[in-house]
Image (spheres, rainbow, N blue to C red):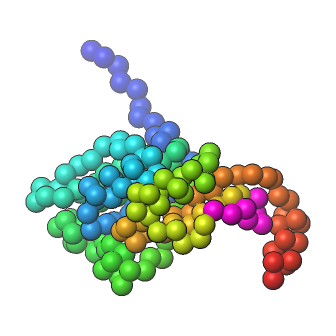
Amino acid sequence: MTERTAPIEIPDRYRYAVIPHIMVDDAAAAIDFYQRAFGAREDFRVDAPGGGILHAEITIGRSALMLGDAGVDEAEAASFAAPASLGGGTSVTLHVFVPDVDALAARAEAAGAEIVQPPKDMFHGDRTVILKDPAGHLWVFLTHVEDVTREELLRRMAAAG
């Protein structure tokens, strides 16, 4: 008989983060876009019994993201919605740190992302780009360029008006 060890309470993949779980109208197309635009890796997917994707997980850099089709029966029963069904708006913006925000922005734009704010150095010490993906989700990608003290951050904010 093999002795079993107790399962890890929180898997390492989820240990230090709130894991975003987004809903889209075509999860397979979204995964393809995230792979082309953001260099995402698909970790796994569970197809819905009636078609579509019930649940999938991808990794962008070191960040995990869960997603699925808003139109599958199980998602509709729980009232999950994609941004398009909400008039195109979203109340969540996804932030991901990457090694080279400029390269990611160029890659994402070539893949079809809308550049909402081009890459620029921000008062908080990060070079930042804001993108909208084809599903309507907003993404903020950042590359850390300098450590900024709280005092300096407040000074820069005040100077910016």
Q: Residue furthest top?
A: 1
Q: Which residues are the magenta region?
A: 119-125
The image quadrant that residue 6 belongs to is top left
Tell me residue 33's x, y (percent): 36, 55
Label count reads: 0
Residue at coordinates 23% horizontally, 49% vertically from top-left? 46
Residue 21, percent from left and from top: 40, 60
Would residue 95 appear left or right of 43 to someone viewing this image? Answer: right
Q: Which of the pair 33/47 is nearer the observer?
A: 33
- Residue at 43% x, 69% y is 137
User: With respect to residue 92, does 49 lie above or below?
Assistant: above
In x, y percent, where is residue 101?
60, 53
Q: Is residue 58 visible?
A: no
Left or right of 92? Residue 4 is left
**Left or right: 125 with respect to 50?**
right
Q: Residue at x 58, y 58 (%)?
A: 141
Q: Quadrant of the N terminus?
A: top left
Tell me which corner region of the image, top left, top right, bottom left or bottom right, holds residue 110.
bottom left
Q: What residue is rendered at 44% in x and 76% in y?
A: 90
Q: Is residue 114 visible?
A: yes
Q: Is residue 123 magenta?
A: yes
Indicate whether 30 appears above or below 9. Answer: below
Q: Nearer the viewer, residue 93 or 7?
A: 93
- For the C terminus, the image quarter is bottom right
Residue 49 part of the magenta-drawn span: no
15 relative to 35 in the view: left or right: right
